[in-house]
Image (spheres, rainbow, N blue to C red):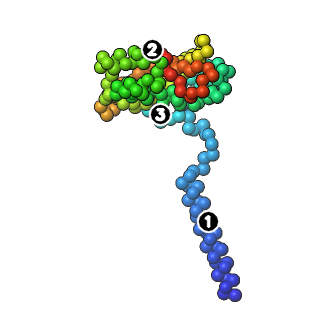
Amino acid sequence: MVYGDLQFIDIIIFAGVAAFLIYRLRNVLGKRAGFQKKDLGKDGDLIKGLKTTQKPPPSLKENELKFATAYENLPDFDHKNFIEGAKFAFETIVNAFNSGDKKTLKTLLTKNVLTSFEKAIDESKNNASFQFYSLVIGGVEDVVINKNIIYITLKIASEQFKDNDESSIIKKQDIWTFQKEIGSKTPIWLLSST
């Protein structure tokens, strides 16, 4: 019966190891499941820890109502993807402008805006030493259609600093309008107004 006793001991050891691993995984991964209210700031719509002192953006429901025109006219439109793309475009455009990268700007701006950006670069009004600290979309100002082109205007709050010196943070408020031709297969929205 020695052999049977060893199998029983092996089972107890494996059960103990499994219980220990489950306990450790639970401690490491946590007990939370999905969205919990304690993640929200006092206004209920801004996650704590953002590096900004700006007023929180309008509620998602208010922005969704403003995006109704885009949803009605663009079959593949998703406001969350648009907002993320706008943040990326804003940072890319400002960094390209600051570094004098006209090639990158040409792919993201309408002809009129590109002309004004190129003129500013040629007049040395750009500054390559500025870097982003934070960026928040403050809200959707407007969504309109004119001559088969849809325009979405956003309020953008950014903080930038110079020469890696975070004590030199400058807060900026911008109103940017992005445009796209209705029916266009390209996912790229062009900056048409600042």
Question: How far apart are the two marked residues, 3 and 2, measured between alpha carbons?
Answer: 34 Å
Q: Badge 3 is on which residue? A: 50
Q: Can the viewer see residue 157?
A: no
**Type of the residue with mark 3:** Leu
Q: Which of the 4 image quadrants contains residue 158?
A: top left
The Cα–Cα distance between marks 1 and 2, rounded to whole angstroms, is: 65 Å
The reply to whether the C-beta atoms of the residues labelled 3 and 2 are less than 8 Å apart is no
User: Callout 3: few (<14), some (14-19), or many (20+) C-alpha neighbours within 10 Å?
Assistant: few
Where disc 1 sits, the SS reads helix
What element does badge 3 sit on? loop
Q: Residue at x 57, y 38 (%)?
A: 38
Where is residue 58 shown, x and y percent of the image? 56, 23
Of residue 179 and residue 78, the one placed in the foreground of this image is 179
Q: Quadrant of residue 67?
A: top right
Compare marks 1 and 3 and give the one earlier in the sequence.
1
Looking at the image, which residue is at 57% across and 57% down? Answer: 25
Q: Residue at x 68, y 21 (%)?
A: 72
| Drawn side of residue 194 relative to residue 162, left or right | right
Q: Which mark is residue 18?
A: 1
- The amino acid at mark 2 is Asn
Number of other residues with Cα within 10 Å of mark 2, as a class: few under 14, some 14 to 19, many 20 or more: few
Instruction: Please identify the quadrant where the N terminus is shown.
Output: bottom right
Q: Which residue is mark 2?
A: 112
Q: Are marks 1 and 2 in contact (CB under 8 Å)?
A: no
* First of labels 1, 2 by sequence position: 1
